[in-house]
Amino acid sequence: MFAASLFTPRRAAPNRAAAYQSTALEIQVAGADAHRLVALLFEGFEQAAAEAQGALANGDTELKCRALTRAIRIVDEGLRSHLNVDAGGILARDLLDLYGYVVQRLTLANARNDAELIAECLRLMQPLHEAWLAIGRRAPSAR
């Protein structure tokens, strides 16, 4: 009597731009050295945090949550978890603390819908990103 398609959820049309970006990122990651991979993590963090700010401004709670979760995972699982505290000494310990703080603040930003906390994290991470890029320009053997 009723067609089965009436009761199955409709799939959203594929987002071709997102698919292209994902493929482009996969290609970059596949051919990247360790220095470039860290730079990509910083870029991904900045994009996710900016996306969360935009979603927050637009009242899109679901997108804000996804973007902040992505930013948190980049910092915690990508940057923080791969620090070698034994070899890196005080600098690595300081970065470990800073990354922990950023994860805390982003989690709080998500819970409170606080754009200023996201902006604070962006301000804290930007100098690290810039320094990382400067290191790469000065040390071609690191590539």
Image (cartoon, rainbow, N blue to C red):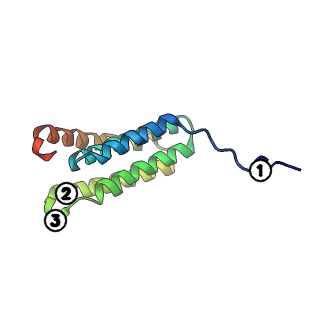
Amino acid at pointer 3: Asp
Q: Kindly check if marks 2 and 3 are in contact, taking CB atoms under 8 A apart as contact.
A: no
Whichever of callouts 3 and 1 sits on the residue coming sooner in the sequence is 1
What is the quadrant of residue 133 in the picture? top left
The crowding category of the residue bearing disc 3, from other C-alpha atoms within 10 Å (few below 14, some 14 to 19, many at least 20), is few
- Can the viewer see residue 93 in this picture? yes
Amino acid at pointer 1: Phe
Q: Which mark is residue 7?
A: 1
Image point (29%, 57%), residue name? 80
Identify the residue position indicated by label 2 in the image.
92
Amino acid at pointer 2: Ala
Q: Is residue 4 left or right of residue 143?
A: right
The crowding category of the residue bearing disc 1, from other C-alpha atoms within 10 Å (few below 14, some 14 to 19, many at least 20), is few
Residue 101 vertical placement versus 40 (above, below): below
Q: Kindly check if marks 1 and 2 are in contact, taking CB atoms under 8 A apart as contact.
A: no
Q: CA distance from mark 3 to mark 1?
A: 57 Å
Secondary structure found at label 2 = helix
Q: At which x and y percent is residue 102?
A: 34, 51
Q: Is residue 70 left or right of residue 60?
A: left
Q: CA distance from mark 1 to mark 2?
A: 54 Å
What is the quadrant of residue 86 in the picture? bottom left
Q: Which mark is residue 26?
A: none
Secondary structure found at label 3 = helix
Q: At which x and y percent is residue 11?
A: 64, 44
Whichever of callouts 2 and 3 sits on the residue coming sooner in the sequence is 3
Front label number (1 vs 2): 1
